[in-house]
Amino acid sequence: MDQSFLSNLEPPRFETSRPFLIAGLGVRYSCETSAGIPMLWQRFGPYIGNIPGETGDVAYGVCVNGDDAGNFDYVAGVEVADFSELPKEFFRVRVPAQKYAVFAHREHISTIRRTVNTIWNKWLPASGHEVADAPEFERYGPEFDPRSGNGGLEIWIPVKG
């Protein structure tokens, strides 16, 4: 994993999310194996636009079920209206209404690890905020181009308060 830091992390905005449902493909990763996440997105790509109950034009990379050893489930997914009629292999994640620190990642997707490392290991300890027990996610809006890896995205970190 890229252990370097950004020298100019943009300050986050704070936003309370509405509750929503995410469905997609998921795999359990560790910090050492998280380089496999792009392959998960390649597997998930053909499903986008063809998922029962899919809503909107945003994709999500959701981290859930983290443990003290650094393992977590990563779900490449989309918002759905409900969980009925989904393919059986799909993971299902309920994102509750929650306060988030929202960070912009404007560089190429290949540099996301450096941004995430800076958020967790520099910004968070210095911020006075505590992480809440809720999903963390990447939000890929319509401006993101999955073919080029450009267009930017947002990283949503759940915080208490």
Image: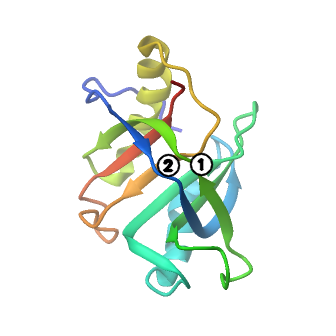
Which label belongs to residue 112? none
Disc 2: which residue: 137
Q: At 47% from the left edge and 21% from the top edge, which residue is drawn?
A: 124
Q: Position of residue 39 (x, y in %)?
A: 54, 67
Find numbered disc 1 in the image and state the secondary structure of the residue it sits on.
strand
Q: Is residue 59 left or right of residue 68?
A: left
| Foreground residue among 133 and 104 | 133
Q: At 53% from the left edge and 67% from the top edge, which residue is drawn?
A: 77
Q: From what the image shows, is residue 118 above or below residue 95?
A: above
The reply to whether callout 2 and callout 1 are in contact (CB within 8 Å) is yes
Q: Position of residue 139 (x, y in %)?
A: 40, 54
Q: Position of residue 161 (x, y in %)?
A: 51, 24
Mark 1 surroundings within 10 Å by alpha-carbon count, few (fewer than 14), some (14 through 19), many (20 or more):
many
Question: Which quadrant would residue 40 be assigned to in this image?
Answer: bottom right
Find numbered disc 2 in the image and state the secondary structure of the residue it sits on.
strand
Q: From what the image shows, is residue 160 above or below residue 62?
A: above
Q: Is residue 107 left or right of residue 102?
A: left
Question: Which quadrant would residue 135 be assigned to in this image?
Answer: top right
Q: At 56% from the left edge and 64% from the top edge, which residue is drawn?
A: 22
Colouring convention used in this rendered image of the protein: rainbow
Mark 2 surroundings within 10 Å by alpha-carbon count, few (fewer than 14), some (14 through 19), many (20 or more):
many
| Foreground residue among 130 and 125 | 130
How far apart are labels 2 and 1 at the CA level?
6 Å
- Which amino acid, mark 1? Cys
Q: From what the image shows, is residue 41 above or below residue 129?
A: below
Q: Is residue 92 left or right of residue 110?
A: right
Disc 1: which residue: 63
| Foreground residue among 86 and 24 | 86
